[in-house]
Amino acid sequence: MNGGAATLVLERIGAGVLAIAREAGGIGVLCGRVVRSLVPPALDARELKLHLYKMGVRSVPIVVLTAFFTGGIMLIQSGIFVRRFGAYGLLGWGVGYAVFREIGPILIALMFSGRVGANNTAELGTMTVTEQIDGLRALAIDPIRYLLVPRVLAMMIMLFCLTLIGDLVAILGGAIMGKLLLGVDFWTFYNSFADNLKTQDLAHGLWKSIAFGGIIALSSCHFGVSVRGGAVGVGRAVNAAVVAAAVGIMLLDYFLTYLLP
Amino acid sequence: MRPDRPAKRLLFGTPWGVSAISLHFELARRIAAQTARGALRGRREPGELVRQMYQIGNRSLLFVAVTLGFIGMVLVYQTCLQVNRITGDLSQVGGEIVKILTHEFGPTLTAMMLATRVGAGIAAEIGSMMVTEQVDALRMCGVEPIEYLIVPRFLASLAMTGILTVFGVAVALALGTLTAYASFHVNPHIFLDFDRVRFGDLVTGILKCIAYGAAIPLVSGHCGLMARGGSEGVGQATTRAVIASSFVVIVLDFGLAGLSYFLLQQP
């Protein structure tokens, strides 16, 4: 009986590892195919523009709101240190460093994954269960080139732009909250920010955002086109896609932190 | 997909938007009221609570461990890098990391992860029940869907968010200590300095866990119950649940951090 239980546990661990390997492999293969179809660069420009608008421009409000609150939260956290040591000159640096390098790209990527990535999985999943993708194939249109490549490119470009906007809004949010909560005026904030931060810090976060855009796009497309089983399947695929994107973001963040200056 | 003219959109969109928002608020109010009533007293489906706790808690363990582990490593690495550049005294870093994980990053980032996993899961499940008319079938059998579907998830999430946060912070600290030791040669005994965590930090962390744990199932259950129309509707509901519950977590964090800054964190 004891041996049976142990086998069961091993079996379940093995099944879990296999499932993870299958999805990771699927994302890897999809990445290869997307890169392969970019080699003679043939792009559906209209489709790309549509997705740039739908994924990027329409996400601006949620990103701006998130970034504003993020700036406020970081200000409160730095405020705790600043009040303890009385070092008001370090406030802008504290907020800027945290926002530019880590918190800004990560939180904006998570929101982007929720809004755009999940939406993309739902859209592709619906197309898959209603057999529209097979329809495309029957018309001799390559679904990867027509459907996936513009989405992947649009997400990478737009997450970069949104992170740039979000970083600036977060700093602005930090400055406004600093004025309201701690009574630190804008010049003190700006000076500490401008004196201690380099372009490198901003670039560090922006490089990360491009990579995050790629992993969000690939995981959402992968789970979207491999949906099985109607409405229930679509819901489950969206769930799996956002989870995979979150794990991917954290993994990439870790490695890029070491690799980038 | 060209945007309509703004004036036209405002003219025709506003009444529609107002009615849609008021509908949302009505449903949200009903969900909150009935969940509160059902959580306090009400018939419980035997075993349902345990099943939901397993779904929300145990099934998220690996996800929380992986994400929070990497966050812990990155947090320690970036902080040490910056402190090295400015003062070079790394003995203080550990205590501050423990403190900030307790009252800020531990609860909030765990909740962001749960908003993604649990929020999407709840909305997908309830949304598919909605579009396949299982929720209507429940109502026809005289079962109140909110009490039957949302109350067990609410209670399970309330309990499990706290437990997962403790677990996530432990993983983040363990890996962070390793990073500090491997990359910057900080002694683990010096790094793991729990003396700086004060009562106020602990209270803030616990309050945040409770608030997030309550908000995520309510918001995503609401999104699930609003699902209409086939697989597209389920996808939309799930998307909306992820966004709405992540955003609620950030707003709650801002509010609670501000509150605790003024009330509890006296220097």
Image (cartoon, rainbow, N blue to C red):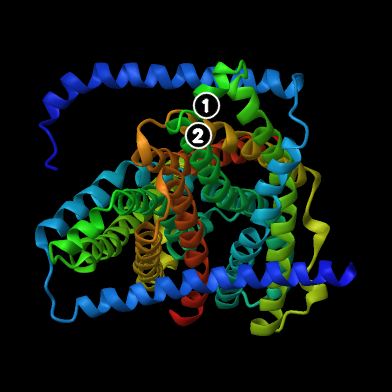
Residue type pointed to by label 1: Val
Q: Tell me the element at label 2.
A: helix
Pick whichever, A58 or B224, lies toward us: B224
Give the image location of residue B114, x and y in percent.
Answer: 59, 49
Give the residue furthest to the right: A2
Quadrant in the picture for the C terminus of chain B: top right
Q: Nearer the viewer, residue B119 or B51?
A: B51
Task: Give the residue number, with chain letter if any, for mark 2.
Answer: B129
* Image height of B95 relative to A40, above or below: above
Number of callouts: 2
Circle 1 sits in a helix, a strand or a loop, which is it? helix
Percent coordinates x, y for residue A252 in the rendering: 47, 72
> In the rendered image, which residue does mark 1 sit on?
B135
Image: B137 above or below A185:
above
Residue at (65, 39) in percent of width and height: B213
Q: CA distance from mark 2 to mark 1?
A: 6 Å
**B60 vs A210, nearest the viewer:** B60
**For the residue carrying disc 1, how many other residues have a C-alpha within 10 Å: few (<14), some (14-19), or many (20+)?**
many
User: Residue B71 in the image: x percent, y percent?
Assistant: 59, 65
Residue A4 lies in what quarter of the image?
A: bottom right
Q: Residue at x 63, y 69 (%)?
A: A15
Crowd rating for badge 2 (residues with CA inside 10 Å; few <14, some 14–19, many 20+) = many
Q: Quadrant of the N terminus of chain B?
A: top left
Task: Residue A29 in the image: state x and y as whole percent.
Answer: 37, 76
Image quadrant in which you'd find residue B221: top right
| Dot 1: chain letter | B
Q: Is residue A236 left or right of residue B148?
A: left
Compared with A238, B250 (above or below) is: above
Q: Are marks 2 and 1 in contact (CB under 8 Å)?
A: yes
